[in-house]
Amino acid sequence: MDMEARGHSEHPEALRLWLRMLTCTQLVEKQVRSQLREQFDTTLPRFDLMAQLERNPEGLKMNELSRRMMVTGGNVTGITDQLVAEGVVERAGVEGDRPAYRVRLTARGRKVFGEMARQHEAWIVAAFESLSAREVESLHKLLGKVKQHHNAQQLDKLETI
């Protein structure tokens, strides 16, 4: 049973919308996870870690990776160990911070990730192919309003502290 099945007609429309968005997110994510496994023999967390490193060519400290991925340091260490063993990422010491390591993609890692990223983009585009370009743009703008409202509420809370 998907999340949307939890909603009933007597629930507020906003709750039913939330459940539909959550269901759609889970369906797309399930497809992406499956495709990553089938085509690249990898996982979404490994893809996400490599994506963070691709956006930061100079590399990131392990604690930065953990924060950006919103997972524990142990999870990042385990994934990093696997990717180092495969030769797609490397660790380098951080000058002035002896226990810290900076992790970055190797040349091979950039090539491997580039292939995965192109495919990932195609999968996401395909996930929304039932919508017209105008509908995608409209949905993006509407969800942007929700995001902006939420961010404004968070700022209001911080200002009252």
Image (cartoon, rainbow, N blue to C red):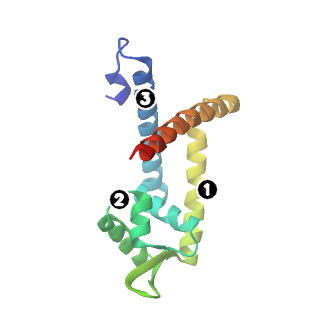
Give the number of the mark in front: 1 or 2: 2
Q: Which residue is mark 2?
A: 71
Residue 40, percent from left and from top: 48, 60
Between residue 70 and residue 4, name the one nearer to us.
70
Against 148, is 18 above or below?
above
Mark found first going from the N terminus, 3 or 1: 3
Disc 1 residue type (three-letter): Arg
Determine the secondary structure under disc 2.
loop
Question: Which of the numbered marks, if any, corresponds to residue 128?
Answer: none
Location of residue 1 (image quadrant): top left
Residue located 56% across and 44% down the image: 124
Residue 41 in sight in this render:
no
Residue found at x 52% / y 62%: 51
Percent x, y for residue 75? 32, 64
**Circle 1 residue:** 118
Which residue appears at 39% of the width and 69% of the height?
63
When the figure is inspected, residue 38 is found, relative to residue 53, above or below; the finding is above
Element type at mark 1: helix
Q: Give, as a three-letter code, the residue at label 3.
A: Trp
Mark 3 vs mark 1, foreground winner is 3
